[in-house]
Amino acid sequence: MTNRKGLDGKGKLAVAIGTLKLKNPVMTASGTFGYGEEYAPYVDLNRLGAIIVKGLSLKPRSGNPGPRIMETPAGMLNAIGLQNIGVKSFIRNKLPYLRQFDTAIIANVYGETIEEYLRVSEILTAAGGVHALEINVSCPNVKRGGVAFGTDPDMVAEVTNGVKDVTDLPVIVKLSPNVTDICVMAKAAEAAGADAVSLINTITGMSVDVEKRIPHLKNITGGLSGPAIKPVALRMVWQVAGRVRIPVIGVGGIMSPRDALEFFIAGARAIQVGTANFVEPRATMRIIDGIGAYMKRHRILDMDNLVGSLRI
Amino acid sequence: MWTGSIIFNNKLGPQHLHMAVRLPSEFVNPSPGQFVMIRPARGGEPLLSRPLSIYQFTRNQDHVILEFLYRIVGQGTELLSRLPSAAEVAMLGPLGNGFRIEKNRSHRILLAGGMGVAPITFLAQRLNDLVVTKAELQICLGAKSCAEIVGVERIKGFQGLMNIVTDDGTIGSCGLVTDLLPDITRGCDPCQTMIYACGPMAMLRTLAEELAPTRIPCQVSIEERMACGLGACLGCAVDVHNRRGRRVKKSLCKDGPVFNIEDICWEQL
Ligand SMILES: Cc1cc2nc3c(=O)[nH]c(=O)nc-3n(C[C@H](O)[C@H](O)[C@H](O)COP(=O)(O)OP(=O)(O)OC[C@H]3O[C@@H](n4cnc5c(N)ncnc54)[C@H](O)[C@@H]3O)c2cc1C
Ligand SMILES: Cc1cc2nc3c(=O)[nH]c(=O)nc-3n(C[C@H](O)[C@H](O)[C@H](O)COP(=O)(O)O)c2cc1C
Ligand code: FES
């Protein structure tokens, strides 16, 4: 089923995430690429390895009050609070558009309760045209669910297990960096049957307006993304890749081909581009081209020869 | 993303600048109230582009020229202000929904506070072509002081009545733009009138309160911090009442920046 759209997994840049075959390892990070259509005027969506859409909940969510974002040195804070149109509206209004592209569509799933995670996963599986699920147990900006599930290995396992029971799609568990040891969470996800883990979601942070003595974000705290978090993300990817057998997807501050390559060498099988889309809508295209050029220059035949090739 | 080349980037005062950028002729004609996301092309800090309203647009044979009026308030605008002629800027646009021009309403009142003068001037230029008598177009500019009233010369070239107010009375009358409202709207026919406004939040909030009982329609351009400018990040969400009176989130960058004043949930801002 995952090969239906010509994602035949051939070519130098092809990678496999479980049964999910991607034409290249570059995905768009959830919440930074809308539902894909927003970027269509700038990006050839057919060239992307995968599009991961904004986190979906069972019912529409209106998110947090503003201000929701603030730029900080080498990055930004966001506290969107998972505003989204809800899974049913996504299937009705956004998925038909996405289906026409020759790229994998990955839905990012969020729930306030385990039941909600399972229900959303079920609905997305039945819809057809979704190629994998990314389970978001790492959103720091919501009161219930999200990171509450991602900081306890038993909860990570329970959500993963439950979702695996209701879907035959590959399941990616998206991990939070806001934990003492991310490897514990990755191992819990793997043991519960996850097909892959993606990391990292944003790092909780804050910023203060000293003139007014108020937080820049109405939510007070927010999630830090962008180049500022890249070294942390890279370190975590390297640690997790050494501890689990399932593919690791690297996310965090990837702005350039060189950044992406660092993640592959450290052990990531694929990467996601987030904040970079805001800075330059065509960032993913430049990154895909740059990875290809690097492989050629270094005479690397396929991604398997690059992933985890760190020399220590 | 467009790459533009700066023609000039002139200081108009300690904090105000007037910038003109040359762009390829493929740049779509913008409408008044639309904006661009702009940053220096070479990148660096800050990472994100900043939204600026279009102040003036000129189409020439093989290129277009976009002009901006902006004020230095922080790092992003400070960085822009230091770009010399011939430096390159990266730009997305034109973005958003601008002002609706209703041709059948013969009385137009334009209110600009501070940098609100940028989109209001572009609008005044468009309306100028529709105006038959001077009284059909009224333009009110407000700012803190004389030094902060910028772009007056261009507006003076248009038809229409002009009022200037400053907080300290250093030019024009002393007070706020909204102080002019009772006089200007006295006897106005709500079916024939349209108010267009852009300025600081406090000004627009007062406007919303004062206009509510008059039933005169008003379109306002509002601001919120932005990351993508494309409706993707949901960073710029504002609460708006939909047709059924229900409160919904809209993306200021895609659904705005111009909204009907009565649709905005002011208590949320
Ligand atoms: C649609 C739109 C059109 C605009 N048009 C113009 C224009 O024509 N001319 C002009 O001078 N300015 C305009 N602005 C405002 C301009 O975008 C901000 O002044 C600029 O982004 C500030 O960036 P900075 O890095 O210099 O300041 P920052 O360091 O980002 O911020 C400095 C201060 O300004 C506030 N601020 C930042 N961004 C905004 C924003 N978007 N709206 C309101 N306050 C903000 C911050 O909270 C902070 O207090 C417009 C804004 C929008 C949303
Ligand atoms: C505005 C914004 C919204 C986001 N929304 C989501 C979301 O809905 N679900 C999710 O799993 N991650 C979300 N994220 C996290 C990103 O997918 C990504 O993990 C993070 O931003 C780090 O990558 P980056 O540094 O490349 O942006 C969001 C990030 C940003 C900046
Ligand atoms: S700035 Fe990203 S949605 Fe408006």
Image (cartoon, grey):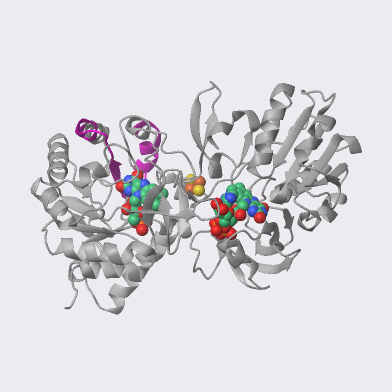
Direction from residue A38 to residue A98 in the image, left or right:
left
Image coordinates of residue A243 in percent, x first then y, are 11, 61
Vertical placement of B34 versus A25: above or below? above
Relative horizontal placement of residue B237, taking residue B6 as reference (left or right): left
* A180 left or right of B122 in image: left
Residue B148 in the figure: left or right of residue B75: right
Q: Residue at x 61, y 65 (%)?
A: B78
Q: Which residues are drawn in magenta?
A: A91-118
- Seen in the picture, residue A50 relative to A126 is either above or below; the reply is below
Indicate the position of residue A191 as horizontal and vertical percent values: 8, 49
Give the position of the C terminus of chain B as an image quadrant. Answer: top right
- Would you place residue B25 above or below residue B127 in this image? below
Name the residue located 16 percent from the left edge and 44 percent from the top edge.
A156
Q: Where is residue A79? Give x, y as percent.
A: 40, 46
Task: Identify the residue shown where x is 24% and y is 42%.
Answer: A148
Q: Nearer the viewer, residue A301 or B13?
A: B13
Residue B100, x across and y down, in percent: 69, 36
The answer, for residue A52, to whether it is visible in the render is no
Which one is nearer the viewer's eye here, A88 or A225? Answer: A225
Q: Is residue A135 visible?
A: yes
Q: Is residue B152 magenta?
A: no
